[in-house]
Image (spheres, grey):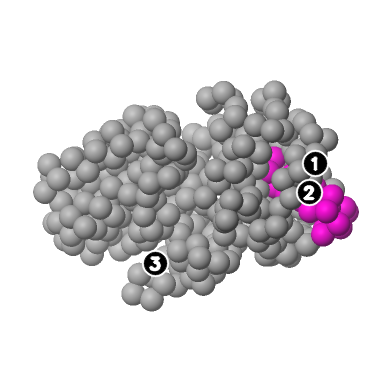
Amino acid sequence: MSDILTVPVGLGDRSYDVLVGAGALDSALNRLPALFPRRRAIIVTDKHVADHHLGTVSEKLAGAGLVPHPVIVEPGETAKSWDGLRHVVDALLDLNIERSECVIALGGGVVGDLTGFAASITKRGVGFIQIPTTLLAQVDSSVGGKTGINTDHGKNFAGTFHQPKLVIADMDLLTTLPRREQLAGYAEIVKAALIGDAPLFDALEADGADVMEGEALSRAVAAAVAFKARIVAEDEREAGVRALLNLGHTFGHAFEAEAPKNAIRHGEAVAAGLGLAFAYSAHRGICPKADADRVAKHLETVGLPHGATSLAWTDWDASRLIARMRDDKKNQDGRITLILARGIGDAYIDRDTDETDLTRFLETQL
């Protein structure tokens, strides 16, 4: 077992650790009994993750003196719905969960978001633990306490801020993950570096495609989590600087909304959005073109999209993408808010986007 990296998320009496590395779950077992006073571990997971990991995780929990109680949800974004939320909340209530207990989210971002939301509203709040099984969830959604479901009005439009008690990012749980899903998660690591950690980007760039392997990946995950932890500690509820974590997401969410279901992955859309955010920053004369070119080259080197035309779906329309961007939750006073960059490691919030200029720019990129 490799050394486990511990990243603290400092939020006063709601602080918690993120354990990163191969074998992180084994290293966490001695912590768990204190979080389960009734010695039962309610585990929310989906059918796909259950097939791969539920048996092993349940055995480890049983070895720590806990009795597993699985709650199975449907795989995919359809679970992040009012019906999916009702299913999980009813399951917790059927088990008569107490406020002193925790529920485990075992899965990717969908399971984590859904379970966290259910935990936050059941009996006005029970604890939960994140055991993310995708790289994307390890570096992004499992840390920071943003929970939620999708509604007819948009992605994650109903939710709460509810911090986990512990996050266990065990790299051994990624072994069954397809390469495409691993790459989609890596986009969030690059995003952290581009927002405010230029030395991290230099290191990722130096590793090239090898960054996706072994200890290099564990170090990259821990560095990205540490960066996000600093942002969350400063701005837990996204009133200011935390909005920087949406670098690439305004473009990315528009791509996701416009593409056919399952045509592109969230991380792929974010990667393309990162490339466009830097390209648009260079277009406006804010960012050196050389930095935008470095970003595009690194994304291409590791096998990620770096713009609209390198996504698996390419039938885009600039005006429709702009319409999607107008619905973004970060917008204020009817104006599109973008996260742009003055250079690598120097992102900022831009609330003065000229829609006409942005539309023209997008037309050149499609």
Mark closer to the observer (1, 2):
1
In-front residue for pair 110/308: 308
In the displayed structure image, the side of residue 330 where residue 24 appears, left or right: left
Seen at 51% across and 38% down, the residue is: 175
1 and 2 marks in contact (CB < 8 Å): yes
Mark closer to the observer (3, 2):
2
As measured in the structure, the alpha-carbon distance from the residue carrying label 1 to the one carrying label 2 is 7 Å
Q: Position of residue 182 (x, y in %)?
A: 58, 39
Magenta stretch containing residue 268, yes or no?
yes
Q: According to the image, label 3 marks what residue?
A: 16
Q: Earlier in the sequence, mark 1 or mark 2?
A: 2
Disc 3 residue type?
Tyr
Magenta stretch, main secondary structure, is helix
Q: Position of residue 206 (x, y in %)?
A: 78, 54
Q: Which mark is residue 280?
A: 2
Q: Which mark is residue 72?
A: none
Disc 2 residue type?
Tyr
Q: According to the image, label 1 marks what residue?
A: 361
Tell me if mark 2 has few (under 14), some (14-19) or many (20+) residues whose alpha carbon lies within 10 angstroms of its own: many
Q: Over which residues does the magenta segment extend? A: 267-291
Seen at 66% across and 53% down, the residue is: 338
Q: Residue lying furthest bottom in this view? A: 12
